Image: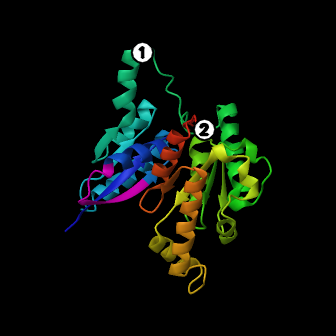
Amino acid sequence: MTERRTVFFVSDGTGITAQMLGHSLLTQFEGVDFNQVTLPFVDSAEKAEECLARIEAESASGNGQPIVFSTLVNQDVRQVVRRAKALFLDFFETFIDPLEAGLGVKSSHTIGRSHSAMDKKEYQQRIEAINFAMAHDDGASHRELGQADVILIGVSRSGKTPTSLYLALQFGVKAANYPLIPEDFQRMKLPEALRAHKGHLYGLTIASERLHEIRQERRPGSRYADLDNCRYEVEESENLMRREGIRSINSTSKSIEEIATTILRELRIQRQVY
């Protein structure tokens, strides 16, 4: 039987950092089924006691020792949660203390610095990037395409929209996306709106069978979802990108994170981390 454990990500902020770090570690354990629970904004003794009670209840349920990943900054709040009968992994103590020693400087111990709007300039840049991605989704607008850091191209449902939004949200990258359609394949040319921005184009392709599955869920039984049509569109889009010298990546078995990182590296886009 698969072992089951409940994992708590406890934070005095959004919990995003605890989730990201903790999830990266948990993926290394394939034989365990993790029930993941995020407890954000634990920023007072009262909330810490509520958090403690929830972890203790899980501990008493007989489902194995809970695991707690913590990014709690406040020492008093941290000590309350530490009383839980759980495996307690403190990212703050693990990394901040060695950094203080190495830098010779005390940290500010400020809550919520990693995911906040405190740095107004960087936050505003990210919001602008998100708005840009939404305004330029699926070729909706040709205006200001020259401002794009990257313009993703590919057939419909090849992963352009989620990748664009991820690049904007995670890295503040202005990403547009534009669909390649049968008319483009018949002309054997890029759409007119893209030709002036060729240096910023990056292609996404996908296995025909996987594209067929995705399109079938959206429009079952349609010509759009037909496997032969999917094969035609994928083949022609790949031919067009090769002919135009546009770099591309196959999205079939890659995560959005892997696709985005490849694009940033190959186009040498300077990324911000939020």
Residue placed farthest to the top in the image? 104
- As displayed, is residue 182 above or below residue 269? below
Q: Are marks 1 and 2 in contact (CB under 8 Å)?
A: no
Give the amino acid type for the residue marked by disc 2 in the picture.
Answer: Ser
Res. 116 mark: 2
Which quadrant of the figure contains the N terminus?
bottom left
Residue 33 colored magenta? yes
* Gap between marks 1 and 2 measured at Cα: 24 Å
Measuring from the top left, give residue 140's x and y in whole percent: 75, 60
103 on left or right of 163 = left
Q: Which of marks 1 and 2 is nearer the N terminus?
A: 1
Residue at screen point 65% across, 37% down: 117
**Looking at the image, can residue 20 be seen?**
yes
Q: In which quarter of the image is residue 92?
A: top left
Measuring from the top left, give residue 76's x and y in whole percent: 42, 32
Numbered disc 2: secondary structure: loop
The colour scheme used to paint the residues is rainbow
264 on left or right of 191 = left
129 on left or right of 144 = left
Q: What stretch is highlighted in magenta?
A: 26-37
Q: Which of 215 and 197 is in front in this view?
A: 197
Which quadrant of the figure contains the C terminus?
top right
| Residue tagged 1 | 103
Residue at screen point 69% across, 44% down: 148
